[in-house]
Image (cartoon, rainbow, N blue to C red):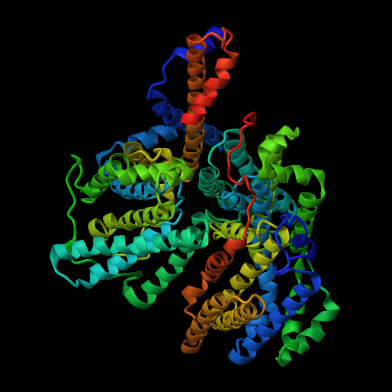
Amino acid sequence: MTGFLDRLFGRVRLGGWLAVAAPVLAIVFAVLITSVVLLVAGKPPVEAFTTLADYGTQPRTMVLILNSGVMYYISALAVAVGFRMNLFNIGVDGQYRIAALVAAAFGGAALVPGVLNTVLVIVIAMAVGALWAAIAGLLRVTRGVSEVISTIMLNAIATGIGSWLLQEHFGVLTGNDLGTRPIPEGARIPGMPLVAGTPLLVNGLLVLAVVLGVAYYVLLSRTRFGFELRATGKSETAAVASGVSVKKMIVVTMVMSGAVAGLIGLPELLGASYKYSNNFPTGLGFTGIAIALLGRNHPVGMAVGALLWSFLDNSSNQLQLIDISKEIVQIMQGVIVLSVIIAYELVHRYRIVADQRRVGRQLAGSDGPGGGNGGNGDVSGRQAVEETA
Amino acid sequence: MTATDVSVDRPVGTPAAQRFRLSGPVLLLGLAGLVVVLSLARVITGANDITSAGTVSAALGLAVPIGLAGLGGLWSERAGVVNIGLEGMMVLGTWFGAWGALQFHSPWAGVLAGAAGGALGAAIHAVATVTFGVDHIISGVAINIVGVGFTEYLSQLVFTDMPGGGTKNSPQLPKMGTVSLSFLNDPLRTVEAKHWFVVSDFAGVLRGITQDVSWFTILAIVLVPLSFYVLWRTAFGLRLRACGERPLAAESLGVNVYLYKWAAVIVSGVLAGLGGAFLSLVAAGIYRDGQTGGRGYIGLAAMIFGNWRPGGLAGGAALFGYTDALQLRQGGVSVHALLLVVALLLVAVAVYQLVRQRRGGAALITGVVAIVVFMVFAVTDTVPEQFTSFTPHLTTLLVLSLASQRLRMPAADGVPYRRGQAK
């Protein structure tokens, strides 16, 4: 038994496969839980999943999945920027809604022609999102208000101000739908016929999502700013010691997160409905949080997460055909998120224990006093790891 | 804010001479002063609803779920577990409360079921944060997502087949009994209707808190001193709070930190579940999707406002409940009158800062803010109805940004704990 554990903890080198194993296991676990819930309600789980899979792989659905996935992904990026610095921007939801509303109003007013208008919409969306997020950042650094609470409150305030702006200032009634004036054709971004076998077009803002994903990677992993951001997230004291101004970092990160959040509404504004109305998608900020957790803030991981989420959302309606309520998908999404975070935590612990054993063994092997039983080596090994971690 | 609750647990060695001390008489005086200010604003603006019995009664009803959620937050954060999942646990409470009441044809069965529903959500939070050491906020956010999905699925499954029920709401729920001091009703109503300065306002407030008070409200109010007693006056509470301040020290004294954290989180879920059950059973008499409307978060804010103390938390809940109630009662006019109240209170604060604390700069800033608020009040007639919807949230934000400097949360709040890390 000890031999097996030794092999498992001590000698087997843990590659990147564990990082992939965690989400896969979590999804399997979520499927199991969902099956149990379905069975309790007397519904056939296998049929439910095959229905989801069948519908999800049709060309038309694939386009829909990509299109919602684009928004989910941008939202996840906005959240992830904050997460990397231990900043919980729960307010992405309010930031993107207020940004999209103001940007749509300016775009619809057609102040400048053609492509300039597109640029204007993008700039305004980013600026409004950034400003709205900056409130929370400034409150945190000047008054010490936790950004978790302040952004939640700002979400509610954004809802109120948004509906006031829409009803009293920006809104035009078309039929029953109150919305801003549509953005003129010259400023719209055309769709792309990427998927064969369906007339539906993939939202052109897919390009924006890809660019943002790459920019996110480069910024965080290849620049000094990104390094400082991650360092502050890992250890504030260490960051301060190396000359990082934590207050400045908090405000800048919050503003960046808000600016990205401002972009969430663009696929809808520039590529789908061209206006902000009462039917504008809501709650994307919270979807973004879930996906950022799912993808562990990694640009590729989040892309996979966004597609998975979007697949579940888009295919869920189909379940009603076999008399299963589509809300089962929400349960599944929730369980996936919860089990993924627990799985990551377990993998993380497993790694630490394995590293401790490995270091302990090396220390025990290299010098005499540790002896063969590994007791001393174990302790010093743990200390070594804790100091590096 | 009870008198006892501020006087205990004062950090040793802080100079208390210049600090404002809240004792029983001062508190009563303050409350009376508040009514006078409100009365003044009412007479000036004619917004009779800001002290009417209806508003006070609504405020009491709205403060209860916020207060229960806040108490829930208090229990878990005192044991060092940040509980942003209160909202999700409350959502579970609304559904299970409604289900229990319908299933067993008794509102009190609904209360128990709601508590159990909240505890269910809390158990998930405890597994994730206490047992597995997941980041508390991440787990809480996940629970909020799960809570909403789970209840929506369940209502689809259960309420759709009931007469009067639908995919997003339950049938009408059995009513819960209320108590009234009915001999006070008529005389107070007469006085209130006169709209005399101060006198009528007191009559309105009294009538609001003595007529048609639900038994559930009384239960909730009792839970505040009870929580204080358990957390600050028993060995169990001392150990629980030790887990929130110095888990490793608690561990070295033989306290099973995991057990205490688990207990605290479960109690937290029970309280949040009760808050949810109150919303569906008493406040609305029906379960609806999205009924909580973020009250779990406001409860958390009330707890922070109350400096992680039961008394302060109750004060915060009352404040947020009151602003919430105003938007229901002639929202625009009442909230507009509230601006005047805020301006007057700010003037009082500025005078206090200048005369008692001799902080001229601070007094100047407060004074300028007071003037700005008064200007806004003077140039507008009413507040747009959309703005009144976020009055409680804005109040929360303002209060936190003004007061957060003096708040002290439990030292190990939100820090993952693992047994055996003490060196």
Tag count: 0
In the rendered image, residue B309, in percent from the top left (x then y), is placed at 70, 57
Q: Depth check: B268 or A36 in front?
A: B268
Residue at the (77%, 46%) spot, across then down: B237
In the rendered image, residue B229, in percent from the top left (x then y), is placed at 80, 53
Write down the quadrant of residue A254 in the picture. Answer: bottom left
Image quarter of the C terminus of chain B: top right
Residue B302 visible from this viewpoint:
yes
Q: Depth check: B229 or B18 in front?
A: B18
* Residue A70 versus residue B8 in the image, above or below: above
* B153 horizontally vs A163: left or right: right
Image quarter of the N terminus of chain B: bottom right
* A2 horizontally vs B238: left or right: left
In the rendered image, residue A227, in percent from the top left (x then y), is placed at 35, 42
* Residue B377 versus residue B147 in the image, above or below: below
Q: Depth check: B233 or A37 in front?
A: B233
* Residue B341 versus residue B117 in the image, above or below: below
Residue A8 visible from this viewpoint:
no
Write down the quadrant of residue A164 in the picture. Answer: bottom left
Residue at the (64%, 72%) spot, across then down: B322
In the rendered image, residue B218, in percent from the top left (x then y), is placed at 77, 63
Q: Depth check: A258 or B95 in front?
A: A258
